[in-house]
Amino acid sequence: ATGTETVLHSFTGPADGEYPEAGLLLDAGNLYGTTFKGGAYGKGMIFELTTTGKETPLYSFGEFTGDGLYPSAVLIADGAYLYGTTQGGGTSELGTVFNLDTTNNKETVLYSFKGYPDGATPESGLVQDTAGNLYGITSSGGAGEECLVLVGCGTVFKLDVAGSESVLYKFGSVTNDGNEPIGGLALDAEDNVYGTAYGGGEYGYGTLFEVSQAGKETVSYSLNPSTQGGYPDGGLILEKGHFGGIASSGMPGSTTAYGTVFEFIP
C-alpha cells in the first residue's frame, strides 16, 4: 500500500512453470495460479504460492491422453476444488474445463470442447452460481463450421454439477452481434450472464452483452472507439449494479488510442 513492490516468485522453467498469463486467486491466505507453458510436460501447470513467496507446483498438464493443455485464465475455488479452463487439449484438442482436488492434487477433465456447435478455445476463467453450476465463454467455434477453428464467433456455455454442458448462446446469431469473447464473465442475482466481446458490434470494436438463463442474448452496448475505446479484453466486474471493464485500445489519433477504463450502468 506504500508503493513498494516485492517480487514474491520468479519463474525459472520448465519444471517451475513458464509464462503466467492469468491473474491470481487468493484463497485461505495462499495464492493459486497457472502458467501457460512449463511444468513436467511443457504444457502448463497449476501452482500454489504462499504470501511469503514459497511456490509449490500442484499439477502439470499433459499427464494423460485427452488432458487439457495451455491454461491462460484465472482459477476459481469451491471448497476443496479449483476450477479452470485450458485453451488446448481435450479429446478434440480444442480446450477443456477442469477441476483440481487440492487434497490430493488430482485433476479431472470435466468437459472437452468439440468446436461445433459447443465452441472452442476457452481463453477466460469461469464463474459459479450458488447451485454450483459453472459458466464460461469460448473465443471461437459455435454458430457454424466457419467458426470452427480460431475464427472469431464463440459461445457462452453452462456446465451443470453433473458435468452436462449446454450452450446458452452462439455469437454471430444477430446483426451487429459481438464475436470472439475473451474476457471474464459476471453474474447478477438472477444468474444472468454479462460479459464483453472483443470484436463485432455496431462499430466493429466490441460489445457488452447479457445472456439470460433462457439463452436470450442482448447486446447491451457497442463500444465506440472514438469515445469509449475498443477491443474490451479484460472482462467485467459487478458492484452494486454497475459494471466496470477495460478496453485495450481505441481509434488511432483519438483520446482513447491507448485504452480506457469504463463503467456501464444497465
Image (cartoon, rainbow, N blue to C red):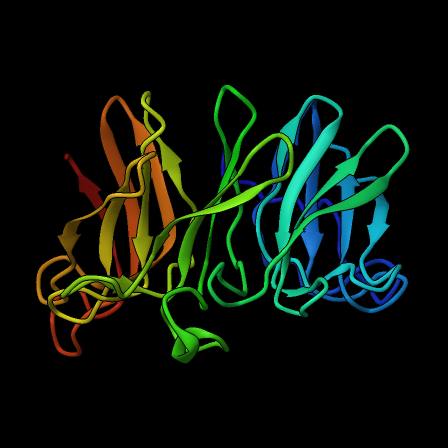
Q: Specify whether 157 is left or right of 202.
A: right
Q: Residue at x 31, y 43 (%)?
A: 215
Residue closer to the observer: 4 or 156: 156
Q: Residue at x 85, y 58 (%)?
A: 16
Seen in the picture, residue 164 relative to 68 is either above or below; the reply is above
Residue closer to the observer: 245 or 93: 93
Q: Residue at x 64, y 32 (%)?
A: 162
Residue 234 lies, in percent from the top left, at 39, 53
Quadrant for the C terminus, please.
Answer: top left
Residue 89 lies, in percent from the top left, at 71, 65
Instruction: Locate residue 198: give its quadrant.
Output: bottom left
Instruction: Locate residue 56: give its quadrant.
Output: top right
Residue 69 lies, in percent from the top left, at 72, 63
Q: Specify whether 83 is left or right of 190.
A: right
Q: Specify whether 88 is left or right of 185.
A: right
User: Total label count?
Assistant: 0
Seen in the picture, residue 148 relative to 16 is either above or below; the reply is below
Instruction: Locate residue 173: give its quadrant.
Output: bottom left
Seen in the picture, residue 35 relative to 25 is either above or below; the reply is below
Residue 70 lies, in percent from the top left, at 68, 64
